[in-house]
Amino acid sequence: MHEKIIILDFGSQYTQLIARRVREVEVYCEILPYNKIPEITSDIKAIILSGSPFSVREENALHIELDKVIGKVPILGICYGAQYIAQYCGGKVERSSKREYGKAELRVKKDSESFFNDMMPSSQIWMSHGDSIIEVPDHFEIIATTDSIPVAAFKSEVDAYEKPVYGIQ
C-alpha cells in the first residue's frame, strides 16, 4: 500500500500542476473529485484542497464536510481551498476590493514548522483571485501577507487540531 496525498479537486485549472509538483518530490498522490472524500486510512498522509472557478460566497459554491478530514491528517487549502477552510471554520471571506492578479510580494510573518522552508522573508509570487480572506477563524494565525491582502497564508494554532491545517491564497 502506497503512502499518499489526496488532492480534492474543486475544478481548479492548476490541480494537475499541484499533482505534478507533489510527484516531483517523489510523493504519490491521487486527484479525486471534491465530493469523493475517501475514508481516512493510515496510508493517507495529507489532503490538499484545490482552487476553483467558484467563489465560496456563492449559493452554488462547492462544499464538503470538512469535519470528515480536518484534524485527522494535515490539510493544505490552496486559493478556493484556503478560502473554504477559513469560511467553514468561522473566518471571513469577501470580494476583494482590488483583484490581485499577477506578481505580488509575499511577506512571511511567521515561519512555522518550515512551511516556508528555503524562501526569503520577502519573495515575489504569483496571485490570482477575486475573493480574499479578511479575517482568519479563531485558533488560526496569519503567517504571510501581500501589499493587497492581509491574509496570504494562515495556519491552525498548535492546539487547535490534532493535525495542522494550512491555507495559502
Image (spheres, rainbow, N blue to C red):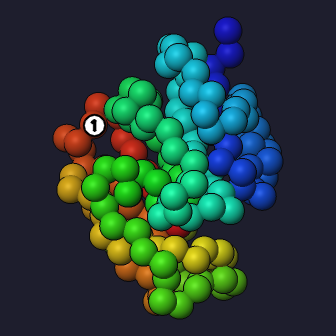
Q: Which of 154 and 96 lies nearest the eye of the viewer? A: 96
Identify the residue at horizontal 44%, vertical 30% (top origin).
69
Q: Position of residue 13 (x, y in %)?
A: 78, 58
Observer-nearest of 166 and 85: 85
Q: Is residue 134 left or right of residue 114?
A: left
**Is any atom of residue 118 visible in this view?**
no
Which quadrant: the N terminus? top right
Give me the residue at 78% from left, 52% from top.
17
Question: Is 50 placed above or below 110 here?
Answer: above
- What residue is at 42 percent from the left and 37 percent from the top? 66
The residue sitting at 38% across, 57% down in the picture is 86
Question: In this view, which residue lies farthest toward the front?
Answer: 59
Which amino acid does the dot numbered 1 rest on? Answer: Tyr
- Residue 95 in the image: x percent, y percent? 48, 78
Residue 83: x and y in percent read 47, 60
Q: Quadrant of residue 126?
A: bottom right
Q: Is residue 154 visible?
A: yes
Q: Find residue 156 and report its horizontal and vertical position in percent.
A: 31, 50
Q: Is residue 154 left or right of residue 20?
A: left
| Left or right: 162, with 138 as reference point | right
Would you place residue 18 above or below residue 29 in this image?
Answer: below
Residue furthest out toward the top: 1
Res. 5 image quadrant: top right
Q: Which residue, given by chain and number where applicable, does mark 1 sit on?
A: 161
In the image, residue 141 above or below residue 106: above
